[in-house]
Image: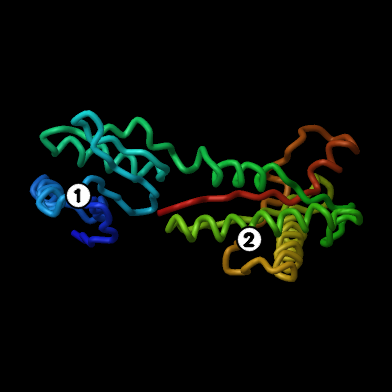
Amino acid sequence: MQMKAIEQAAGVLAVQIDVLEVRTRADFEAAFASASRQGAGAVVMLSSAVVSMNIEDGRIVAKGTATLTWIQRARTFSRMLPAPVDLSQVQDINLGVLGKLREAIQSKEIRFEYNQPLPMKGQEGVLDQLAAELKELTALSSRERLTTRVTLTGHADNTGAGLYNLTLSLARAEAVRIMLKQRGVDPDLLQVRSAGTLEPREAGDTQAARSINRRLSFTVVLEE
């Protein structure tokens, strides 16, 4: 278990505890006992989380943001303590800023003309916005010690042979990946895949449906 004094002022000491490294109830109790002996009034638990823990009215109350995995693990270990930690004020980070950013990225699509691997004209603004959001996502997830994976999935309409459409869809994903790289996005962040005609957004064999299905979609995954 990692435990390090990080701040001492006015008789109040904060201690860092990585809950993902705590294995037994004895580990947890030893950490709190050590903090108490040193006059600690607060404990900060870190592991893909920014959480402060304070003693309020005789209760240990946690506040901040963390991943759902972190929250679940913290709940498990809090039950090892004589007095469980109140985690009701710790928010899932995916529902906060990172979550909204992920939703914004996933809501965007890049459109294509018939049989073309490059995006339609007039989408430079969408690409610029995507690049800015992806760079912000990378910075925030790094700060929160999260691993981010973004998948670019190319799609095609239902005209032409299946194998050709898979190849065309992959070319579309690669083209957008290159355009985002040119806008400063780390290429290692981006994965590409081809869906061909297998994941249509609009059912039907109309011209409008085919136009909608010539697209590139984004999937964002945040992991500890």
Instruction: Please give the residue where the numbered disc 1 appears in the rendered image.
Output: 40
Looking at the picture, how far across and down is residue 183, in whole percent?
74, 67
Q: Nearer the viewer, mark 1 or mark 2?
A: 1
SS category of the residue bearing label 1: strand
Front-lying residue, 216 or 24: 24
Is 42 on the left-hand or right-hand side of 95?
left
Quarter of the image with the C terminus in it: bottom left
Instruction: Please give the residue where the numbered disc 2 appears in the rendered image.
Output: 135
Looking at the rendering, which quadrant does residue 91 occupy? top left
Looking at the picture, how far across and down is residue 211, in whole percent?
86, 43
Front-lying residue, 31 or 128: 31
> Answer yes or no: do the residues labelled 1 and 2 have beta carbons within 8 Å?
no
Gap in Å between the C-alphas at discs 1 and 2?
A: 38 Å
The residue that appears at 40% across and 45% down in the rendered structure is: 66
The residue that appears at 50% across and 42% down in the rendered structure is: 94
Looking at the picture, how far across and down is residue 139, in whole percent?
55, 60
| First-in-chain label (1 vs 2) | 1
